[in-house]
Amino acid sequence: MNLRERVKEAVAETVRLQQEFWEEQGDMVAAAARMLTGVFKDGGRVFIFGNGGSAADAQHLAAEFVNRFQIERPPLAALALTTDTSIITAVGNDYDFNEIFAKQIRALGRTGDLAWGISTSGASPNVVLGLKVARELGLKTLALCGRDGGEMAPLADIPLIVRSKNTPRIQEVQITIGHILCDLVDFLLYPEKFAATGGGGA
């Protein structure tokens, strides 16, 4: 296989997974957008967390909400639980790495907030525990996961599952989901900003 063929194979797999996901779970993404919108409207906060590439996605998506996505609008209350190295290393050192998100949710989470876990396996212990604690505290829960959803899916009010075992391909679909959620939240919160292009609340 030459390099061009390898590229074509990777792109074809991503396109296939994208199509399969949106055909199967497009309505669930819309439901997730409505859930996120409700949290922001009611003054709640969204806590996003994951490991490795999923940590990067958590920070990326929090930035889209706090700063802006594609329209000018007020900042939205989102926080990536992957950024405070002092908290993460203190909890990991004094207790256990599996507690790094759960402890932050216990400290910061309140009823009306939302915990959003991201994992390509659906089985990352610290993400699973974070969602468990969020449920115990009465937070809404959203899971963005791969494979068969793992332990995360049953803990989520809405699980969005990319059904693949290929980590890079899962991540490519997951960031698309994240971007579309950002767009839908803006669309639902500020329909007047979309009027010029034929938009409106749904």
Image: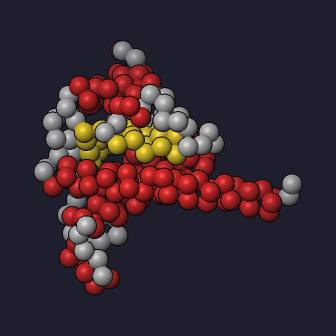
Front one among 137 and 105:
137
Please name the residue shown 35% across and 64% down the image.
183
Q: Give the quadrant of the N terminus.
A: bottom right
Q: Is residue 8 left or right of residue 126?
A: right
> How far across and how far down the image is residue 14, in percent?
62, 56
Q: Is residue 187 left or right of residue 61?
A: left
**Residue pushed farthest bottom?**
196
**Residue pushed farthest right?**
1
Q: Is residue 39 left or right of residue 83?
A: left
> How far across and how far down the image is residue 104, in percent?
27, 30
> How far across and how far down the image is residue 152, in percent?
42, 32
Residue 82 position (above or below residue 35): above
Please name the residue shown 70% across and 55% down the image.
10
Colour scheme of this structure image? secondary structure
Front one among 38 and 81:
38
> How far across and how far down the image is residue 146, in percent?
52, 40
Please name the residue shown 44% across and 52% down the image.
25
Is residue 140 among what the camera can see?
A: yes
**Residue pushed farthest top?**
94
Please name the residue shown 41% across and 34% down the image.
153
Front one among 132 and 126:
132
Q: Give the quadrant of the C terminus.
A: bottom left
